[in-house]
Image: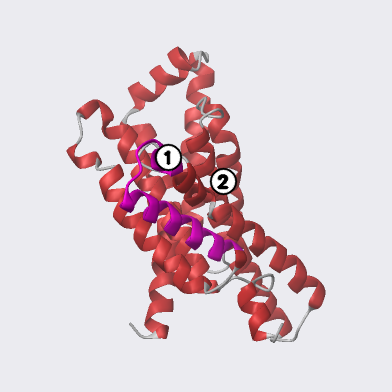
Amino acid sequence: MTKKNRKDFLATVGPFLLVVTFIEDGLRIFLRWGEQIHYMTSVMNLGWYLGVFCLLLSATIQLGASSLVIRPAHIKPSRVKPGCYGLLFFVAVQPFMYGQARDVDFMCRSITLAGGLLLLIWSENDKQRRSENMGLPQDGQSQGSDRLQLCGRLFLTFIFFFQAIYDEHGGLHKVFSSPSFFGVCGSLLLLVLSALVCAGFKTEWSALLLTAILGISNCFMYPFWSVHERLVDFYKYYFFQTLSVMGGMMLLALHGPGGISLDMGSKKGL
């Protein structure tokens, strides 16, 4: 793929993958309504009316905000940023709404999704700034934008550090308990690539390689199409959530690491 075709592909697929987990989760609320109500009332111990309210609010925010993010570009004005803000709000309250605040893996994935959304907000701010200033440098705005991009970049690597250090399918704890060549190499590769993305060094290719690794591992770790029926929802949820993490990595590969990065420092001759 040429550079232009690659960027066009990432610009189209990245935002869609980023919100696909919210679309799937919002639709599942209605498709599995009975199970959702049972969970809210029996597991979370909420009253029936409060449980219904929480589920309807959850579905409305996820589906409504996702539609704003992926709406066609020719529909003006753009509503990407309000959609991202809505999804960020949902990501912040979801662990408490579903009782997952103490699940380290779930929280790492939530932080990673928040990082992807911050990167999308940053890209929209950058487009608006360039349009309004006609490409003229604005140091104050640029520094604030770079900090936002840095936060998004750091958050986006949470899941990779978690999988490299502690994960039920691998991680350094398994390397120490039952060491193997592929286990050591896999953990080190994730750690190195995550560190490169955090530092903003060779960001595009590091992000694309992480995306490929995550896509391949996703099919092995969460094959919801071939597991027992009682595990389908669990595997499907994490499968689509991983797709959204891939979308965030695609956005990082597309827009670059921003001003606070080794890549930008090398361009400036630092």
Please report the residue visible at 43 percent of the width from the left and 77 percent of the height from the top: 7
Quadrant of residue 91 within the rendered picture? top right
The picture places residue 174, in percent across and down from the top left corner, at: 39, 39
Task: Point out the image quarter for the N terminus.
Answer: bottom left
Disc with the residue nearer the chain's start (2 vs 1): 2
Q: Residues within 10 Å of mark 1 (few under 14, many from 20)?
A: few
Image disc number at residue 84: none
Depth check, front residue: 152 or 9: 152
Q: Is residue 188 left or right of residue 256?
A: left
Query: In this picture, is 41 found above or below 262?
Result: above
Asked whether 186 falls inside the magenta stretch, the response is yes
Please report the residue visible at 57 percent of the width from the left and 50 percent of the height from the top: 114
Quadrant of residue 9 within the rendered picture? bottom left
Which region is colored magenta?
A: 171-198
The type of residue carrying mark 2 is Ile
Question: Which dot, 2 or 1, sits closer to the camera?
Answer: 1
Q: Is residue 229 visible?
A: yes
Q: Secondary structure at mark 1?
A: helix
The type of residue carrying mark 1 is Phe
Spatial separation of the CA atoms under disc 2 and disc 1: 27 Å
Q: Is residue 185 left or right of residue 207?
A: left
The picture places residue 185, in percent across and down from the top left corner, at: 38, 56
Depth check, front residue: 40 or 111: 111
The picture places residue 26, in percent across and down from the top left corner, at: 41, 40
Q: Circle 1 is placed at which residue position?
A: 176
Depth check, front residue: 205 or 56: 205
Helix, strand or loop for the magenta stretch, by majority:
helix
Q: Circle 2 is placed at which residue position?
A: 111
Task: Point out the image quarter for the C terminus.
Answer: bottom right
Query: In this picture, is 182 found above or below 143?
Result: above
Q: Secondary structure at mark 2?
A: helix
